[in-house]
Amino acid sequence: MRHFLRDDDLTAAEQAAVLDLADAMKKDRFAHRPLAGPETVALIFDKPSTRTRVSFAVGVADLGGQPLVIDAQTSQLGRGEPIEDTARVLDRQCAAIVWRTFEQARIEAMASVSRVPVINALTDLFHPCQILADLQTVREHKGRLAGLTLAYFGDGANNMAHSYLLGGALAGMHVRISAPEGYHPDAAVLARAQEIAAGTGGSAEVIVNPVTAAAHADVLATDVWTSMGQEAEAAERVEPFRAYMVDELLLGVAASDAVVLHCLPAHRGEEIAADVIDGPHSVVWDQAENRRHAQKALLAFLLGRGDQRR
Ligand code: CP
Ligand code: NVA
């Protein structure tokens, strides 16, 4: 049984195969029908979502299946029913379980008993579906991934930073995390990224100075300073992160053809300047669209049905 709980649940070769399939699915959106029946995919949300919910729902329908969106707050899971019992009910009726939740341990508990693939639609620790879409986007614009430098600015300890580390290293990229003291990546995730990078020709490092991190980078990426669940810390997070806004200064020292990523939702004037996210280097709308294609490819791959067409 294949699950996708973190970026390195795929090997480098499997990640590349999923990205190739995502490109094929983007070219011919209704050609692949691995969920024909229709089979149902459960999409459970413990936190709010726009992109993830829409892209999975549309993507599952594209694949011939039907999405079942479950707001955890109105389910028994939200009232404390054991995660494992929820898995045992869902896996008899659904082809896959997609879940956005809090602690990584929760999705690991779901996967530990589920007899169908469990997919991480964002946890506190990782956002691996987003990184697949980001890699597809970068490859579309740059023609390759291996050897490119991706610099991420802001909260180095959040799900996006951790997934850039693992997913970028798997793709053979040079990943720079630029974050203030106190907001550096989880040490085990950084070490794992460095281990992966040693085998793919990439690298993974923390660079505190944002201008140093941005220098000659091919990709500049950022994310909100305050993630879902951290709202009580929002005020104290502004000052340390101020120097990490992706603006014309950072863009000016990056490669002249650099692309700018933001997983969205964005706060213009905080983690990203309005003229950058709305400017010519920004590829954020391609990035948001590619969630659909990348996740369709991932679903087909995990189900072992990557070659199933109409
Ligand atoms: N980027 C992303 O996951 O967006 P949503 O929170 O809207 O799903
Ligand atoms: N780091 C953000 C990503 C949102 C898609 C969060 O967890 O809220």
Image: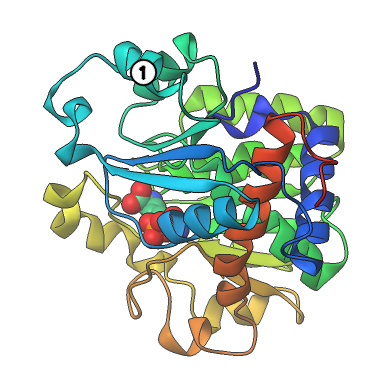
Label 1 CB sits under 8 Å from any ligand 1 atom: no
Residue at the farthest front position: 37
Residue 39 lies in what quarter of the image? top right
Q: Is residue 202 visible?
A: no
The quadrant of the rendered image in which ligand 1 is seen is: bottom left
* Residue occupying image coordinates x 72% and y 62%: 30
215 or 192: nearer the viewer:
192
Give amino acid for label 1: Val
Which part of the image, by quadrant, shows the N terminus?
top right
The residue labelled by disc 1 is: 89
Q: Is residue 293 above or below residue 256?
A: above
1 or 192: nearer the viewer:
1
Q: Is residue 12 above or below residue 264?
A: above
102 or 174: nearer the viewer:
102
Q: Report the side of 11 relative to 259 (left or right).
A: right
* Residue occupying image coordinates x 73% and y 58%: 136
* Residue occupying image coordinates x 40% and y 24%: 90
In terms of secondary structure, where does tag 1 sit? helix
Q: Is residue 43 above or below residue 61?
A: above
